[in-house]
Amino acid sequence: MKKRILGNTGIKVSEIGFGAWTIGSESYGEVSEADATDAITSYVQAGGNFIDTARRYGASERRIGQYLEANRNREKLILCSKTFAGQKMESITEIRKDVEESLKQLSTSYIDIYYLHQPPENDEVIDNALIQLEKAKEEGLIKYIGASIKGPNVSQSTLDLCQKYIAGGRVDVLQVVYSVLRQKLHGVIIKAHEAGIGIVARTALESGFLTGKYPPGFTFPADDHRARWSREHLNFILGTTQDIRKMVPSPYTSISQMATKFTLSNPGVSTLILGARNSDQVIENMDTSKLPMLSSPTLEILKRRYGNITEKCNTKVV
């Protein structure tokens, strides 16, 4: 597994990370305990070291903690989690409680990166939220501070918020949406990288849309988080995905591989996180790292054709 340096942290992270939302049996359907354990095991055995979870991901933290207890390989892994608290002044004190609960669920004495899951925009709230994480950092409960910039939509306000956290100089890592379909943050990713801030990209496969599994007109169950997309935007996304699918070059065999390599082509991206329900999906994700990068002509076509469609691929008009 190829590794990259995560900003000024100096950490070497596998370029493909393990997104653990799916194994929490939250918003993507039920995943068994056995499949969750097998998925984590396969990821680590394939050379991955970057595991991303959150307090809001159902059973995810607990299942990762059980894996760590059984395998005793905590020091080999970069463990990340997030708090949903701190969006308003009233919930600032909840940040510390979430850090402690994450430590408990993950069965670890420290967390490598702890993110504000939906980081605040107000300067006063930002200051107080970061003070809480800075205290946890001083105490050794967390090593680095992150901001997982708001989703699922990407707009000018998203870009502005990234700029604010970069300028503030108090976060070590930013997690952002970046894919073939939503390239709006390309420039700000480069800017963060130049400022020494590590970049973790998410939704490279756009919640599974860029797997090519879903034809135009497909309807997701009401309890699936992808049901948030408007019918108009969903049809556009799935139709565009079918167009991109026709462009998959050799030696790639799937649109997923091409989409993953596109996100990794941004020089500011240190790692991207991909979800998986079982070990087979993990192995498929990890094998992509072995493939060559996309050619410059292919990258240019993808940028030219799809570089300005971000807003059409949001859940709705924002």
Image (tube, rainbow, N blue to C red):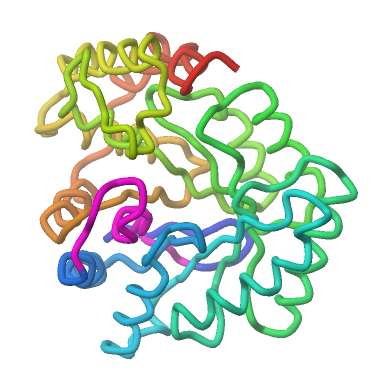
Looking at the image, is 273 positioned above or below residue 249?
below
Query: Residue 203 vs residue 46: left or right?
Result: right
The quadrant holding residue 232 is top left
Looking at the image, is 310 positioned above or below residue 84?
above
The quadrant holding residue 277 is bottom left
Picture residue at 30% right of the left edge, 57% below the top: 25
Q: Is residue 294 visible?
A: no
Looking at the image, is 310 positioned above or below residue 271?
above
For residue 1: magenta? no
Q: How many marks?
A: 0
Which residue is nearer to you in this view: 224 or 295? Answer: 224
Residue 238: x and y, percent?
26, 17
Q: Quadrant of the N terminus?
A: bottom left
Query: Residue 206 vs residue 147: left or right?
Result: left
Picture residue at 26% right of the left edge, 71% below the top: 44
Picture residue at 40% right of the left edge, 14% below the top: 233
Q: Which residues are magenta?
A: 12-32
Q: Quadrant of the C terminus?
A: top right
Query: Residue 249 vs residue 200: left or right?
Result: left
Residue 250: x and y, percent?
11, 28
Residue 261: x and y, percent?
30, 37
The residue lying furthest to the right in this view is: 124
Residue 308: x and y, percent?
49, 12
For residue 25: magenta? yes
Picture residue at 83% right of the left edge, 54% below the top: 89
Query: Residue 258 vs residue 12: left or right?
Result: left
Which residue is nearer to you in this view: 60 or 3? Answer: 60
Looking at the image, is 2 positioned above or below residue 49?
above
Q: Is residue 65 visible?
A: yes
The quadrant holding residue 249 is top left
